[in-house]
Image (cartoon, grey):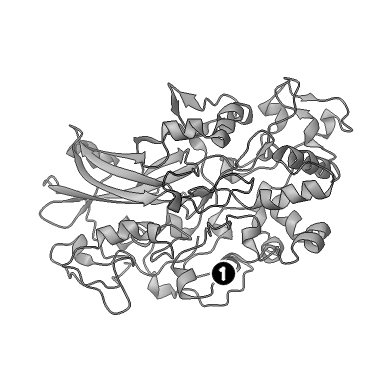
Amino acid sequence: MNFKKLVPALALSAAALIAVAAPALAGRTVTPSSYKVVAWNDLGMHCACPTFAGFLLLPPFNTVRAQVLGFGSNDPVIIDSTNAGTYGVTVSYAMADNTETTLQADPYFQQWITYSPKLFPGFVPVVGGKVQGLGGKGISGTMTYDSTLKDWTAVGIPAYPLVDANTAKNIMTDPLGGAKRNPYPMTNVFVKNSTGTILAQTSTVTPVAFGGCCSCHLSLASANGYPATPTGSFAYLGKMHGMNSSKIDFNYLDPTGDGSSGPIRCSWCHWDPAMGESAAPGLANVWPNYVIMAGATFTKADVKVSQYSFSDVLHRFHSQNTKVLTQYDANVATNCYDCHPGNNVNCYRGSHKAKTTLWCVDCHGNLNQRTAAGQMAQPWKASTLPSCTAASPGASPAFACHANNTVNGTVYPTSPTLFGKFINGRGHKGSIKCQTCHGSAHAEAPSTMTLDNTQLSTLQGSTSYSFPAGKDKTYALGVCVYCHPTKTSTWGVPPHL
């Protein structure tokens, strides 16, 4: 597997983009005298598992993106891979809260270090004493310019929720009963010259949390005579999986032939775009010498690649299974926090939540609607996700989406990979990313969480800037003079063209 092709897991809408002109460099000879950088996490929340000895849903894998502006005597220049070398600048990142010491000492993350080579054959989680993610990035390093997305990226940072020394930051309830954790570690992004002098810097939240799966599955295991532990849960879920048409109780799968079951990765059989896959590789292709342990009631002939995506089987099962609906949550189709991070994290926390009673299903559709519309057959794709002007196919929003003329002129990558049009979109002469001004999807400015608003508050915190009634520096980047020296210093809603 080519780990650098992996793309992260788990878009809502936006209001307006800042009027930042980005003229082509043709004919420009003035080297920028100053720089500014704006960074964001590609999603408002990533998920990671607390344990990895059984099976993997999602690995530690965050992506930080940034746009860099160079300023000379005229309007700003977008700094890309072409002119960065000309100007002698580099773009780098460094996590501020996750450190080599804290990660490698964390008992949960130690499980990732132990088991990830079995989940991703050939992957080495620690190189030269430093943790690295599946994309080859560590908790600090250089960013790479993506010529399709038009931003600087650090793909696959191994961010992980931590037990912070500042206990006020530890708001996430651990579903396994451990200490509360900080799901909002920060990442610093730097623009430096050839001598290493910092020319510009910013900080952004790199959110990552445990989902709600364990909270339900541990009690499920206990109710069926298994220990209320991850091991007990893995054992009972394997038994349940063996009762479906596949007949595969994955407790009896020994991928490496070392005499012990697991760990397994669901996407070996159920293709998952979050793992960088367009088709499931199949267990035999990942581990040709895998073993079926004694006592199994299935054979290797039964171990096949499923036609269904992991997103499909996961969501469809929970929304249609009688036991789930009668014994656990009859409203699981609309209660997204049953599985996605609620547990005091509340991963949906952007401006839409603050202004309205808009809920996830208004934009994405509930699980029954998504299943009926066939969205899980192509998960994580722009075609099945909401845009600023329309909800996902099959959804029935309680509120009107943004009008077409509000985001007129927004463009999208010609070869989009994953995620929706807000995450991949850019406006104002096709240069400025939606998230540069509005923040991460699901945490759009102004967010209901103060930490999300830190970057914009810093960027728009000048006492010379003024804001209309009802607006302040936490709103989307909209003070034109921030980028244009001759423009207004009053916050407004600039054109998207």
Question: Residue 206, percent across and down?
Answer: 43, 48
Amino acid type for the residue under numbered disc 1: Trp
Is residue 460 found left or right of 222 in the rendered image?
left
Question: Residue 472, percent across and down?
Answer: 30, 71
Q: Which of 360 and 216 is in front in this view?
A: 216
Query: Where, quadrant-wise, is the N terminus in this rendering?
Result: top right
Please tell me which residue is depicted at 53% across the width and 64% down the height of the picture.
386
Q: How many numbered marks, from 0 up?
A: 1
The image quarter in which residue 300 lies: top right
Question: Residue 225, percent across and down?
Answer: 84, 44
Question: Residue 247, percent across and down?
Answer: 85, 40
Query: Where, quadrant-wise, is the C terminus in this rendering?
Result: bottom left
Is residue 150 visible in the rendered image? The answer is no
Q: Which of 177 and 275 is in front in this view?
A: 177
Q: Which of 280 and 361 is in front in this view?
A: 361
Please tell me which residue is depicted at 51% across the width and 77% down the height of the picture.
400
Is residue 169 found left or right of 311 in the rendered image?
left
Please tell me which residue is depicted at 42% across the width and 47% down the height of the picture.
185
Circle 1: is it few (<14), some (14-19), or many (20+) Cα within 10 Å? some
- Mark 1 — residue? 359
Badge 1 element: loop
Is residue 218 found left or right of 184 in the rendered image?
right
Is residue 149 visible in the rendered image? The answer is yes
